[in-house]
Amino acid sequence: MMFLVDFSVIKPDPGLIFWSTLIFATFWIIVGKLAFKPIVEALKKRETDIQNALDAAKIARSEMEDLKEENEELLAKAREERTQILNEAKEARDYMVAEAKKKAREEAATIINNARNDIENHKQAAIKELKMEVGNMAIDIASKVIRKELESDQSQKDYVRKLVDEIKLN
């Protein structure tokens, strides 16, 4: 116990200094070879990775700016095309409406003309049928009158000769 009482940190023993230094140097060499090299390599790798990431970020930022400009140009073109398409659609709509109105007028005129023609045809047919009926009635009346007048054979023969003579003259 006496040994512990004599021990002082302020006044170290030369053997303790030697062994402490030897152990520390050995530890430093071992740790330097086994731990510091991988740590330094990992730090260098991390530094290059960070630098590569920064370079990639700069490239991406410049590409994004280019894409942004390109998008703005495309949007402007799209707006122009939309306006042009809307104008063309409006013109096409106006043209189609005008054509439909024109066609409707033409069809209405055709329907009216066809209706007039049908009415005229029906009118002519009715007149013709009426004339036929009147003619048939006149023939019936005439045949009855002639029958009454030509009751004898001699008067019939005279009448037939008269008709034949009239037919030959015409």
Image (tube, grey):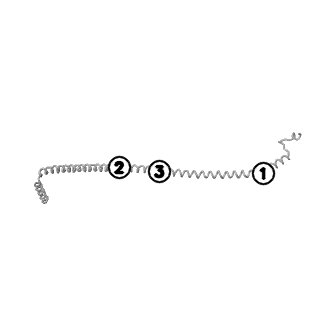
First of labels 3, 1 by sequence position: 1
Q: Nearer the viewer, residue 153 or 2?
A: 153
Q: Nearer the viewer, residue 164 or 77?
A: 164
Q: What number is the disc on residue 100?
A: 2
Rendering coords of residue 59 (x, y %): 58, 52
| Residue at 76% across, 52% down | 34
Q: Which residue is mark 3?
A: 78
Task: Look at the numbered discs 3 and 1 and tell me whether their residues touch, using CB distance below 8 Å.
Answer: no
Q: Quadrant of the C terminus?
A: bottom left
First of labels 1, 2 by sequence position: 1
Q: Nearer the viewer, residue 87 or 120?
A: 120
- Which callout, 3 or 1, points to the residue nearer the camera? 3
Rendering coords of residue 77 (x, y %): 47, 51
Instruction: Label 1: state its secondary structure.
Output: helix
Instruction: Label 2: state its secondary structure.
Output: helix
Q: Which residue is mark 1?
A: 30
| Residue at 84% across, 48% down | 19
**Disc 3 to disc 2, how far (Cα)?**
32 Å
Q: Nearer the viewer, residue 57 or 147?
A: 147
**Disc 3 to disc 1, how far (Cα)?**
69 Å
Instruction: Label 3: state its secondary structure.
Output: helix
Splitting the image into 4 quarters, where does residue 160 fall? bottom left
Q: What number is the disc on residue 90?
A: none
Residue type beneath disc 2:
Ala
Residue type beneath disc 3:
Ala
Q: Residues within 10 Å of mark 3 (few under 14, many from 20)?
A: few
**Disc 1 to disc 2, how far (Cα)?**
98 Å
Q: Residues within 10 Å of mark 1 (few under 14, many from 20)?
A: few
